Image (tube, helix red, strand yellow):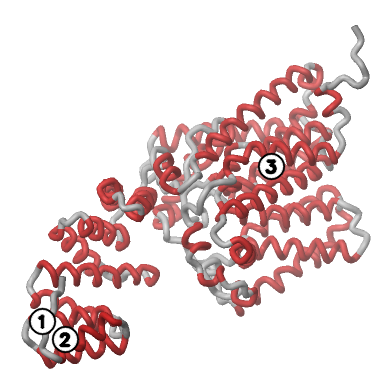
Amino acid sequence: MQKSENEFSFYNLFIPLTTKKAFLFIAIIGIVVFFNGLFGKFVWDDVTYIGLSRYIHEFNIVKLFAYNEFNSGGYYRPIPAVYFSALWNLFGIQTFYYHFVQVVLHIVDTCLLFLLFKKFLNKYISFFLSLIFLIHPVQVESVVYIGAAQSELLFIFGISALLLVTSSMKNIWYKIAFSLLLLLSLFTKETGFLFFIMASIYLLFFKKKSFIKMLPFIISPFFIYFPIRFWYAKVFFVKNISSPIGLLSLHQRFINIPEIIFYYIKVIFLPINIGVDQRWTVTQISFNTFYFPLMLGLIFIGLILFVGFSVKNFRNTYIFFVLWLFLGMGMLLQIFPLDMTVADRWMYFPIVGFLGIVGILIESNNFIQKNIKIFIYAGVILIVILSVRTIIRNADWVDSITLYSHDVKVDDNYDLEDNLGTDLAAMGYFKEALPHFLKGYKDSPHATNIYDLGLIYDKLGNYKLAEKYYYEVLTIKDIPKESDSVVVNTYNGLSKILLLHESPEVSKALLIKAVKRYPNNGTYWAYLALSEYSLGNKKEALYAALKAKDLLPNPTTLKLYSRIHDDLPIDIK
């Protein structure tokens, strides 16, 4: 029986595949796969860098390009700062809109990638590869984690520049736009320079005669970027020592390279154990952590290089995508230490090189072409499986407690334990928070988690242990400047305990040190006034109460000064 011309057919839905159809399907699939990720809250660094940042809350481009949280510690990323500031001033704490914009950016990136692949490959293969880029679980961290929007922003500028350089570029305005897009990629993230390299490689491989003409437009962005970064913002390159991998020597970091490469191979081919904030390190050479991953990594690299000899008709294209993969992966090998050992969001650039290699293998393989229907079905099944895994992973990002509770099973480290403990404590679950702080303290004791232990024991009424950990914070030498608030809070918590549960002599001794270190802290002066008054030292108590009243004028300090002045009793409880 012959089918009616008007009868619905999936074949007719996709064939012929126009660019408009491809874009529509990419948009629909992207929204469906990431839909459950639209409802997550601020998690992880979102709270600090967006929710609590005074720079972000005031939309001031001049300040956002100057020194701030986004432009410090060796990083210069003003475009993400402007992006988040704009969203904050439009939507405040309504995270749905942040997620929606980010998913839209990812969809736009995928559409642009489809256009780039189409320059080299069959449009159907390009569409398939673009869908893998769109829905692969390794992308969840880049798409659902609000703070990772810089991945999409960097890519949208960089790939737009590449698409321009693959066009005729006869108009001077195209060349200026190309140069401006490269500059914006640098202002988004330091790895934007990879697009400078890929644009140069493309010109050398496919447009040799244009390379010299385009060279000024490739170089000129640096003459704008460097003065703004180094002279205006005063953000210089520094070694990252905020993670365990950053504390290792270059030789020790080399030992980690096989395991790092193996991790990214695993997460591409078998994205099961996915987690954020991975801070593991390899400090000893062993079969499982060095020789085995080294062997598999060499086999993987060897296969990529060997296959290159069998794709003669795509030789330059193949090398182009191999270099894309190797350059992208090279940035992740901790030669220059990063703030984590591995991170899925860092694969947003390198995965394109891998997909390009796969696309060339598909298009150049006669066996696949002869059995194309089987491979189409296999491709659909693969996309469905990856999409389901991505949807499941999206659910982990609903809030920080859910995320940390899941990911601590992937890599149980001090930072995840501290973060989980902090969020549980913020909700009043002090008993539940305690074991996480203890684990973090055991793994890597530092000022913050030591203070948190003191605070938890304080909340639980175990004042002896609270004292122990509070005092431990104060014995730490060379506490980083960013942890100064921890010291302030430690003096505050310990002073209360000593006033209520120890002798006034002990509390006075501590508070003299506190006001010497922080002479403008009115709370400390108030506590010192109480200690002096309890010891019968009215003159000293009155002086301290006056300082408290002047530095921290409020009903409490005014009442304190009045009662000391009039020799009235004070109930310090």
Q: CA distance from mark 2 to mark 3?
A: 74 Å
Horizontal and vertical percent position of residue 540: 14, 90
**Hey, what amino acid is under mark 3?**
Gly
Q: Is residue 409 left or right of residue 314?
A: left
Residue 303 shows in this picture: yes
Q: Quadrant of the C terminus?
A: bottom left
Q: CA distance from mark 3 to mark 1?
A: 75 Å
Horizontal and vertical percent position of residue 149: 61, 54
Label 3–label 1 contact, CB within 8 A: no
Q: Which residue is mark 3?
A: 353
Q: Earlier in the sequence, mark 2 or mark 3?
A: 3
Identify the secondary structure beneath mark 2.
helix
Label 2–label 1 contact, CB within 8 A: yes
Residue 329 shows in this picture: no
Q: Earlier in the sequence, mark 3 or mark 1?
A: 3
Q: In percent of the image, x 16 and y 86: which residue is there?
A: 563
Q: Which residue is mark 1?
A: 569
Q: Residues within 10 Å of mark 3 (few under 14, many from 20)?
A: many
